[in-house]
Image (tube, rainbow, N blue to C red):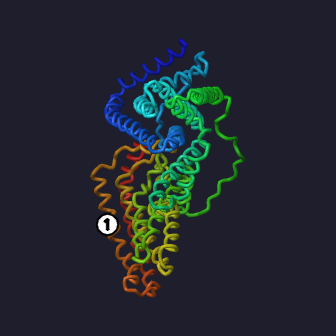
Amino acid sequence: MARLIALVLLRWKMDLRALGAARERGLGLLIALPGLLAFSLVGSFFALVGVRGLRGADEAAVLPLLSLLATGVGVTWCLSPLLTGFALSETHDPSRLMHFPVPPGTLVASSLLANLAQPFVLAELPILAALSLALADRLVFVPLCALGALLAFFTILAAAQAVGLLLHGLSRNRRWQDVGLFVGLGIGFVLSLLPLLLLSGAGGPVRAFLRVLLRSELLALSPFAWGVRAAVAGGRGELAPFALAATAAAIAIAAFLGASALVLQRVYRGEVDLGPARGRSAGAARMLFASALGAVLEKDVRAAWRDPALKASLFMGLLGPLIFLYLLSRGSLGRSGGILALAVFVGAAAFGSNAFGLERRGVGLLFSFPVPRWQVLAGKNAAAVVLRLPVLLVLFTASLFLAPLSQLPAAVVVGLVTLLVALGADNFVSILFPVAAPAPGQPASAGMGGRRGLGAVAFTAALLGGALALAAPFVFLAWLPLLLGRPGLWWATLPLALAGALATYAMLVAAAARLLERREPVLLERILEEA
């Protein structure tokens, strides 16, 4: 017990020292306090009034609904590092204390108790108090309700700690880190779809599933709900069900603490090998393209595929427009020619690709090769086109289902025309205002040296407007037959629009290559400084 108290006091003292050493953390806490106070007050109000109102309307619905809410909060709290990259309860790094003769159970218990002083955790306590008051039939039952609510809260904290320790351990392996990234993106994408489905009227299966879940006894098997069920039973004065549910919640807390201690023993003391995978026989490297332009293209595509952040962007580039496509499918997109406007948007979205950012410190090696600079730019633009293929696939699908089949060639040409001109214009931004992209595994803000100030933003916006103005004549050529009501003219206007866009892109690349030859030393200096 003495070790446990000493560890808890040590963690609190370290947190206070961290606030004093870093003024920005103290300032951030002061800024966050009003928001946490408002959250606590609003949550307490809804817990008190909402539960009281629910009990007056349908007493039988209180237990299953609170069980469902407690399970949802518990799962969200545990998965918050994957969904948002932000842990709602801090998981302390135990590696600094593993060499001391302290049992793993004492370490995890100290971490759990130390979390009680976290601001977000403290903000939950008034909500638990309001919930206890709302559930109690008499004031004498309030302590029983409070004990059950605290047991539910401790269950969530213990489960979140076990999951956090496991994620900390798995993050040591790059492959598992990538898997965690994509799992988080997938779960976040599914959760973001639920409000859209419910609001659009297509959430019938979701509502039916929730109704079945509330009417069944499956929620009684959720460890997160046991403490809440004890609080409900205690508020009614049912001592036997209260004791049974409270005992189950205490056992769940002990089980989660035991799981955390097991993770400490097996992961942080090296009993589980989380190092690199066993080496495989490496064959000879093969290049798909023999030209310098093809080599740049292949290098950029391979680098993007191996970077988890860029790989995630590639998949989200496919999933994001699918939501937009679903929303547009509920209107009259095709009849008004809106599919061509969507094609312009898809093509212009390639602007801002930051051509040299992914090179980081390898940009010096790239420029050391005796390769014409226009081939370097064209290869990087070709790689950007490859990475935009999922979005173009969405555009193709939209043309099939949302517009007459005759508009499909025009939509594809409009998208390609805008894409080519946008990439050609974006080369100037990449040369004049280079920014080193963060290395794999680093946050998105890492390596950003702040070189793009307000002047760069204004220039970029003006250049984007100029790119759209350059693409406008070719988009008009593709759009003209639809305006005239004579689709047969597309056989003449579409090839002219595509040829004009290719010629414009060639001129833009040639001008950007000459600019690159003059500003190459400045570009190298800025990227190497930020990388």
Residue occupying the far right of the picture:
281
Q: Tag count in the figure?
A: 1
State whether residue 379 appears in this view. no
305 lies left or right of 474: right
Q: Quadrant of the C terminus?
A: top left
Residue 103: give x, y in percent of width and height. 61, 18
Residue occupying the far top of the picture:
2
For numbered disc 1, what is the local secondary structure? Answer: helix
Q: Which residue does the image show at 48% across and 41% down from the upper left?
A: 85
The answer to whether 75 is drawn above or below residue 185 in the figure is above
The answer to whether 274 is drawn above or below residue 475 in the figure is above
The answer to whether 377 is drawn above or below residue 164 in the figure is below
Q: Residues within 10 Å of mark 1 (few under 14, many from 20)?
A: some
The answer to whether 77 is drawn above or below residue 1 in the figure is below
Q: Which residue does the image show at 49% across and 29% down from the upper left?
A: 145
State whether residue 453 appears in this view. yes
The residue tagged 1 is 466
Disc 1 residue type?
Answer: Gly
Residue 191: give x, y in percent of width and height. 50, 50
Q: Which residue does the image show at 40% across and 69% down from the upper left?
A: 344
